[in-house]
Structure formats: C-alpha cells, structure tokens
Image (cartoon, coloured by chain):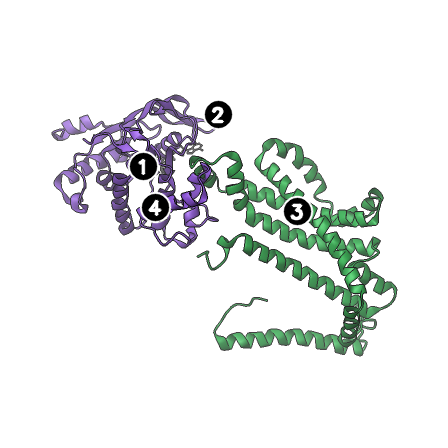
Chain colours: A green, B purple
Amino acid sequence: MATATGSGGMHVGRLLVQVGSILACIAFWQVASTLRLNLGIVTFRNVPPPTEVLQSLIVLLQSPKLLAHLGSSLGRVFAGYGVAALLGILLGFAIGRSRAASDVLLPPLELLRPIPAVAWIPLSILMFPSSELSMIFITFIGALFPIVLNTIHGVANVDRRLVASARSLGGSRAAILWEIVLPGAAPSIVTGLAIGMGTSWFCLVTAEMISGQFGIGYYTWESYTLQNYADIIVGMLVIGLFGMGSSWLLTTLGHVLMPWRSPMVAR
Amino acid sequence: MKAPRVNGHGVGLGRIAIEDASISLGHGDDASEAVAGLDISVAPGEFVCILGPSGCGKSTLLGALAGHVANSGGSLTVDGQAITGPSPDRGIVFQQHTLFPWKKVRENVCFGPKMRGIGKVVRRQLADELLALVGLSGFEEFYPSQLSGGMQQRVEIARVLINQPRVLLMDEPFSALDAQTRSMMHELLLDIWTERPTTLIFVTHDIEEALFLADRVIVMSRRPGRIVEDLRVPFSRPRPADIVTEIEFARLKRRLLLLLRPDQQSTTLHEYQSEHALAPN
Ligand SMILES: Nc1ncnc2c1ncn2[C@@H]1O[C@H](COP(=O)(O)OP(=O)(O)O)[C@@H](O)[C@H]1O
Ligand SMILES: [Mg+2]
C-alpha cells in the first residue's frame, strides 16, 4: 500500500502501526475462533482459526485442484471481460462520436444498465447452451456498462481545442480519432476498464457459486456444502488476491499506456 | 513600406482579402452577429495587429480565417481562394497552448508533416530544425506539461511553422505570460518572422505590443465588430526595445488608447483629430 511520505523516522513509525493493526486483527480472529466467541447476532462458533486456514491454504497450494479452479475462473474472466473491453470501447467510441449511433445504441443500453449483472444469472442459464457460456456472459455483462459509459464520457469530453488544432495542422478525421480522441479519452477508458474488472470478478464469483463446475467461486461454495470451513476462507483469500492482482495490472497498464500522466512528468 | 515577402511557397503568397464579411454565432433564435460588414485586405508578408475591446469579435474573426467558423455573409479569401475549412496553410496559435499532452515536444512539432505522410526520419529532422529556430533545442523529449508557459508557446509556434503556412494567425498568444517573458517572445517572434516570412495576423488588447510588433494596427469597435481605425505603424525595423519611450510611439499609443476607451467607441479618429487639432501623420 502507498502511504503518505514523511520524514524517515515518522514513516517507519507509521508503518509499524499499520502492520500492528493487521496483526491485531488476526490475533483477535485467532482468539475469537478458538474461544468460539458468541456475540449474540454474530458467532465465531463455526469460524476456523487463522492457523487452520493457513494449513488448508498450504494443502490447496500443493494440490492440482488449485490450478484447475483458477484456470477455469481466469479463462472465464479473460473471455467475458475481453469481449466486454473490446465491444465496450467500440460502442463507447461510436456513441461518443456520432449522434446517429448515440440515438440508435444508447436507449437500449440505458434501459438495461440499471439491472445488476447478477440478476441476469437465471435468464442467462436459460439462454445459453452451457453453464460455461452463461458464466462468461455474466462476466461480460458485468464489465460492459462501466466500460461503455466511461468510454463515452472520455470521448465526449476530449478537449475540442485540441481537435480544432489537429484539424488546422492537417489532421484527417481518421487521424484525429487515432491521434487525438483515443489518447484524450484514454484516462477515462482505463478507469472504465478498472471498474469493469472489479464488477467482472464479482459477477464471476457469484455465477460460479450458482452454476459452476470448477472455478474459485465454485470452490468456495463447495467448501461450504462439504463443511470444509477453513477452505471457505482460503477461497475468499484467493478471490481477494486475484481482485487485487487484476486491479494492479490495470493500474500498471495505465502507467505504461499513458506515460505523460505519471507523477514524474505531470507537475 | 516593405516589399512583399517571399515564403516557402514562392513569391508573395499569403494575400488576405476580407470583403463585407459577417459572422453569426449561435444557432436559430440565439444567433447573433459577432462581426458585421468587415473589409480588410492584407498584403503578403504583412504583420497586422488587431486591437479591440473584449468581446468585439476578434477571436471570431480569427476563427473564421482559420476555417473553424463559417462566415454568414461576404467573403474571406487567401490568395483568391475562399476559406472553406481548416488548412495547414493557415496556422493558428491561441492564448492557451493546445499542444497534445500525450506527445513529446518533438512529436507535437512533427504532427503536420506526419499528417502529410512525410517519413519519420525526415519529419524529425524538420522538427528539430524548427525547435532550434524557436530556441528549444534540448527539449525534444520533454512532455508539454514539463515546460514553462513561454516554452509551450514556442513549441506551438514551431508546430505551426513546420507546415510553412501562408498565413500565421495568433490570438493573444502572449497574454498569459509575465511581462519579461512576453518581451522575450516579441523579439523571438520578430526574428522568426524575418527568417520565415508569412503574413501574420496578431490579435491583442495590448496597445504597446501592437505598436511594437506590427506594420499595421487595425482597431475594431464593440460588438458587432467593425473597423474604426487602420493605422500604419511608421517605425522601421529592426525596432529596438526602447522604442516604446519615443515621442512618436507615445503619440500613437495615446491615439489608440482613446479609440479603445469605452466612451470613445463612437468617435472616429477624424473627429478626434479635429477636436484636438492633431496633425495627421
Ligand atoms: N459559441 C458562441 N455562441 C454565441 N456567442 C458567442 C460564442 N462565442 C463567442 N460568442 C460571443 O461573440 C462575441 C465575440 O466573441 P470573441 O470573438 O471571442 O471576442 P474577442 O475575442 O474579441 O474578445 C462575444 O460577445 C461572445 O460573447
Ligand atoms: Mg478573444
């Protein structure tokens, strides 16, 4: 995690406090679960302690199951999110640049947008021949709207003065789209991609819990039905880890694609 | 008077003829004329400053010359050709730079040649020449946001000049700069204009700037903008920086100042001169 920079000593001091806070939470969890703490509305009776979770994690890391679960989850996200990114950016460009495209494409999108992607699960199971395809569809739907809307926003808000200048310098329509509108909208598009990645994972895990065969969401839910309670938490941790990894990936992508926006450059 | 300049295209290109031009802004019921019945003719290579109160339509006129705004009446031509849209032949520089933030300085300057399909090696060489001309050698790999305001405007000028325009349009290009940088930019602009001659239309609200730079100063009235004065600046070139302290300079400055005073907008120069018994120069 990034922290505010201070003078050396203060920095180390704050770091100690932050690490200490995490350790304290884990210690509380350990104590609460071993004591089977019951707080009335919430109980730790069935919560496995961190030590047990760690053991289960090590077991999972060594078993071939992990790769199978992660492989199918990643495959679904890759397919669903990938199509959403491609289609979302194309739709966003069309809607943001052309009034006709906006009139044709935007109304149905606006109608569908308020429906949470998770609500699509039953219908998509009915609509697609395999549960695999229906889960990919859910990740697609989850990512599509943030990507489309942020792309539209980015494209529509490209500085008109830059476009006018490019035209005065001899830029054709196609060149302006590529040289001005795309980079001008890039920050907004990357924001959409990042939000879409988050919702995409969320939708995938939910879909896997309901209709999966493999996948990390399925693993977590299966652990519950099989009463492998420590594995539930292992599943949760892996899901969190991959969420973090994918958002790191997008931040890095943003830095690589938009070097002019890095703090080294921007004053 | 100067002889017509020779520019990259041959002899004496860049003649501007604005005839009875009107420009409406807004649409439908909101439409109103920003400039009306304007007649200006500019010789090739001439340096013309346009002065006028804020909102009188100076930017609108420049936008029309650039081809970003269509005229609603009359005609605007460069070398006899009607202006129908933007063209690299008519470069424009604004008060706030419009450099592409995602392109480094050299790539910004390269933009025009790139659009013309000139190869990478050649266009980079061209860009570096232009950057040397505006005194920015060594900054090729910087992003625009890393430069000062004056440097950004210099890149802007280089980016326009690389297209060898017949006409250079500048809309209060140095207004956002501090006084010292601004006077440096004046010297630089005159040097560049001497080395790479073009017809130059320079909008400003700074009378001293206009008198120091221009061959001719045109004063516009309040909206809808009309011409209230067309003054030939008598000073020879190169002009020393201390020309602003000369008596003739002060006299012209006072004359323009009075024309720009809100309550004097209806008074013509002729009336003013007879009132004050000033001899026309
Ligand atoms: N897009 C527009 N629609 C309607 N009126 C405008 C528009 N842009 C500018 N105007 C008006 O037109 C007039 C001339 O503007 P402008 O050319 O920018 O003046 P100047 O550059 O001389 O200050 C102003 O009164 C301004 O308010
Ligand atoms: Mg203006």
Pointer 2 chain: B
Residue indicated by mark 4: B129
Have a look at marks 4 and 1 and say if they share a chain. Answer: yes
Whole-number angstrom distance, CA of label 1 to CA of label 3: 46 Å
Quadrant of the rendered structure where residue B43 is?
Answer: top left
Q: Secondary structure at mark 3?
A: helix
Spatial CA span between label 1 and label 2? 29 Å
Q: Name the N-terminal-most of marks 2 and 4.
A: 2
Residue A85, label in figure: 3
Q: Foreground mark, 2 or 4?
A: 4
Q: Is mark 2 within 8 Å of ligand 1?
A: no
Q: Nearer the viewer, mark 1 or mark 2?
A: 1
Mark 2 packing: few (<14 Cα in 10 Å), some, or many (20+)?
few
> Of helix, strand and loop, which one carries label 2?
helix
Q: Which mark is residue B203?
A: 1
Q: Amino acid at mark 1?
A: Val
User: Do marks 1 and 2 both belong to one polypeptide chain?
Assistant: yes
Measured as percent of width and height from the top left, residue A124 is found at 81, 45
Q: Residues within 10 Å of mark 3 (few under 14, many from 20)?
A: many
Mark 4: few/some/many CA within 10 Å (<14, 14-19, 20+): some
Please indicate, yes or no, whether residue B156 appears anywhere in the rendered image: no
Disc 1: residue Cβ within 8 A of ligand 2's nearest atom: yes
Q: Position of residue B234 (x, y in %)?
A: 16, 34
Q: Is residue A246 left or right of residue A214?
A: left
Name which quarter of the figure residue B219 lies in.
top left
Subunit of label 1? B
Q: Chain of mark 3?
A: A
The reply to whether discs 4 and 3 touch (Cβ–Cβ < 8 Å) is: no
* Left or right for A44, reference B82: right
Q: Position of residue B96 (x, y in %)?
A: 39, 44
